[in-house]
Structure formats: structure tokens, C-alpha cells
Image (cartoon, rainbow, N blue to C red):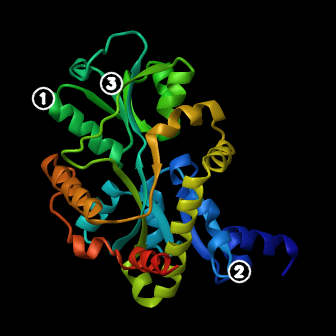
Amino acid sequence: MKPFFILILLLLMGWPAVLRADAYRVGTWKTAQTIQPFFYERYLPQGDRLALFTFTNPADQKTALLAGSLDMCGTTLAHAIQSASLGQPVVIVAALCNKASALVVKQDGAVMTEADLKGKKIGYAPGTMHEVLLRETLSRNRLSPDKDVTLIRVDFFDMNLALARSGIDAYLSGEPFPSQALVQGLGRILAYPYDDQSVGTINAGMLVTRQMIEKYPGRVAALVTAHVLATQYLTENRSVWLSKAAEFGTALPVLEKAAPNMELSWNMDAVFIRNVQALGERMAFLKIIQKQPDYTDLIDTSFVHAVKSKQDVK
């Protein structure tokens, strides 16, 4: 076969995985709060390699996971719940991040309170924690998402452009875009929509398939261990975390502004599980899902507990 056709074949198959057929295939976003997979390789067993794939939304990552193209991927907890409620064989094996959401409005002063959102065009990304938090905000202020506001689907990376061009009047999205709007004078942060009495600050997690756990538990364990160690390292080395995140295209001053509203995570304790269940209840109430998933199937804490046990021994 000619070299040109070999190159085309490698590209079609996904060249990082082809270079090492046994490479760990992981999907994530290029954002500061989902950065841990970029550091996995240094914590994998010696000689093992990582094939990292980046996406712009959780749904595409999950689709690739179910198709067998990924071993693990990041996803919002809301999307994981929605997938499980549809009977898809997904399992959360580690937390990924907390917080990172903000409600942003235009600078013109037309929206000074959440109740002022009535009649406004609001950008949102479907299937995300931000969508749930937005619907919660509207519900809390007795605003119907179908009658009192206009919800417009906007990709995370286009939120500020849509706001600047008056395509939307507000959005609820993830960092660093809210802080970017603030620093660049594109908008104001109206609220950080967390509710400690409801779902807390949970946001995203790392997902695998049930089949992956059953057939390759050692690979899942290696990835979760790498995730825990990468999270701990970046949490303890803030400058490394933000400097690497700046390579994704966001200016360091914006990331510095956003940092207090972002929290890297890995642990899944009793509070985490309770908040995930509370999130599912809110999603059912808001009619985002038709039925609750089986949370004992959706959340597998055994891998993070195994890492904690090893660290306690040390």
C-alpha cells in the first residue's frame, strides 16, 4: 500500500490509538475545569500510553464512548443521569469538577434581578448542568421556560459572541466564558446559581460503560488512579493548572478571575451521591427526564475507594 493511502487510513482510524493499539482512549473538553486527562499519562503504569481526544460538548463524548471509540470520557452529571434514564449502560467512576457555572447578562442594565429575565432570549447548552441550573433559576422565579423566556441553543464557545451581537440577552454557562465576559466588558455576572439546599455545587464526572468495567476493570482502575493523582497534583499546583489551561486559548488573567469559581474533583462520597440523586429528582420535576435511573448502577465508587485505601496505607 502506498504511503499516502496508509496516512489516510491512519487518520480515518484515529492515529493516536493506531500508534499504540492498547493506548488508553480518553475524551474531555479543553477547559480549565476538565483539564485532568491532559496529565493522566504521567500517572499511568510505566510504558502505557494515552490517546486523548477533545470535544466541545458532553453528548458527543458519550456517543463516542458508547460506540467503543473511547475507554473513558468526561460528561456533565446531568447528561450522565439523562443517559442512564434512557437505559444506556453508562457508569460514573469519578467526579471531575464542581462549580464553574454563572448566569451572565448584558451590560445595558435591562436585567438587574433574575425575575427581570422575563421576555429575554437566554443562551444555553442542552444536556448540561448549566441547563438544569438555568431551568431551576427560572422555576424559582416563577418563569416558564416555554412561555416567559426564549431559550436558544448556543455552543459554549459561542456564548459571548452571541451576547455581543445581541443574539441573546443572557446565558448560563461554564467558566471561563462568564469571567471572559466580565474582563472584556461584554457582560455582567448576575448570579452564581448554586443551591446548597438542593444539588450543591456538583458539575461533571468521568464516565465508562458497564461493559468496560466487566471486561477491563484493570484499565478502569488505572485511569481512575491517574485521574485522582492528576487532580491532587493540579489542586496543589495552581500555577501549573492555570498555565496549562491558558494553552487552550484563554488569557491567564481571565483564568485567574475564574479560578475561585472552579474546583477540580475526583471523590464520590455520601454527599456527592446524595446531590446526584437530588439532581435527578430536580431533572424529573423539570421534565428533563421521564424517570429516575438506578443510582446503584449509575455510580460505582469502588475505584475511587480503592485509590483512597492505597493512599491511607501510605
Q: Quadrant of residue 180?
A: top right
As drawn, is 74 to the left or to the right of 244? left
* Three-letter amino acid code of the residue under disc 1: Arg
> Which secondary structure lies at badge 2?
loop
Q: Which residue is mark 2?
A: 20
Residue at (19%, 55%) from the top-left corner? Answer: 278
* Three-letter amino acid code of the residue under disc 2: Arg
The picture places residue 30, in percent across and down from the top left corner, at 58, 50
* Three-letter amino acid code of the residue under disc 3: Lys
Q: Which residue is mark 1?
A: 142
Task: Examine the rendering and report whether any part of residue 175 can be seen.
Answer: no
Mark 1 or mark 2: whose residue is earlier in sequence: 2
Task: Examine the rendering and report whether any part of residue 273 can be seen.
Answer: yes
As drawn, is 23 to the left or to the right of 288? right
Q: Is residue 293 above or below residue 154?
A: below
Q: CA distance from mark 1 to mark 2?
A: 54 Å
Mark 3 or mark 1: whose residue is earlier in sequence: 3
Residue at (63%, 72%) from the top-left corner? Answer: 43
Q: Which residue is mark 3?
A: 121
As drawn, is 219 to the left or to the right of 17? left
Q: CA distance from mark 2 to mark 3?
A: 47 Å
Furthest residue toward right: 3
Residue at (84%, 82%) from the top-left corner? Answer: 1
Local packing at callout 2 (Cα closer than 10 Å; few below 14, some 14-19, many 20+) is few
Local packing at callout 1 (Cα closer than 10 Å; few below 14, some 14-19, many 20+) is few
Mark 2 or mark 3: whose residue is earlier in sequence: 2
Camera-nearest residue between 105 and 243: 243
The picture places residue 169, in percent across and down from the top left corner, at 37, 21
Camera-nearest residue between 306 and 41: 306
Q: Is residue 308 above or below residue 245?
A: below
Q: Total of numbered circles in the picture?
A: 3
